[in-house]
Image (cartoon, rainbow, N blue to C red):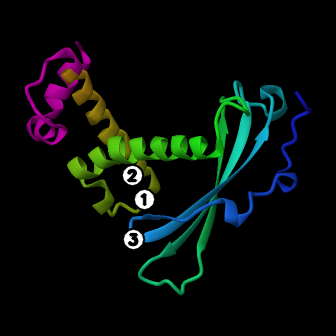
Amino acid sequence: MNEPNVCWLSRPFPPEKDAGWEKHHDRLERRRVARVEVTPESIGLVGCNQVIAVQRERIPLAAPDAKPSIEVGYYATSIPHGGSTDSGLIQMIRDHWAAIENGVHYRRDWTYREDDCRVKDRVGAEMLTVFRNLAIGLYELEKHRGETKADSLKNWTAGMTFTLAREMTRR
C-alpha cells in the first residue's frame, strides 16, 4: 500500500462529464466523489480506511436559469479503498441518510411535530430532543417485549403518562 495522502488538492473531483444529472424532488442533482486512502493511524480514527468527499450540485427545476448550488460532504469509512465503486459509495451514503430521515426524524416529526417546534433556547431544544428520543426508545422496548398493543408510536404516546413511563424503566 502506498503512503496515504490526505491532501484533497492532489485528488480532485472527477470531470463533470463523468457524472450524470439525476432528477429528484423537483431538482436536478449531480454527485461526484473524491476519496483518499488512509490508515487508522495516520488519521486518528480507529478502523478508518478512506476519507470521502462528495460534491453535490443541485439545480431547481422551477428555476432552470439558476446557478447550481454546490455542497461538499465529508465522510470517513472502514470500507477498503477498492471495496466499493464511487456509485456504490454514493448509494451507501444516500441509504444511510434516508434511513435517518425515514426512521428517526420522520417518527419524531410525525408523532411529536418536531419541525413545528419553535423553542429558541438551545438547551431547551436539546432537552426536548432527549425526551422525544427517550419516548421512542421506551415504545420500541415495550414493542420488543410484546408489552404494548399500540399499533404506532403516535397511539402509544397518546396513552402514555409519566407514571407509566417511570414504571417501565423499573422493569
**Residue drawn where x is 79% and y is 36% of the image:** 37
In this orientation, does residue 127 appear?
no
Q: Tag 3: residue type? A: Asp
The image position of residue 92, as x and y in percent, is: 53, 40
* Residue behind mark 1: 121
The image position of residue 81, as x and y in percent, is: 73, 33
Q: Distance between the residues labelled 1 and 2?
A: 5 Å
* Residue behind mark 3: 26
Q: Tag 1: residue type? A: Asp
1 or 3: mark nearer the eye: 3
The image position of residue 86, as x and y in percent, is: 64, 45
**Residue drawn where x is 58% and y is 62% of the image:** 20
* Residue behind mark 2: 124
Quadrant (top left, top right, bottom left, bottom right) of the C terminus: top left
Q: How far apart are marks 1 and 3 (CA)?
A: 34 Å
Q: Is 160 included in the stretch rendered in magenta? A: yes
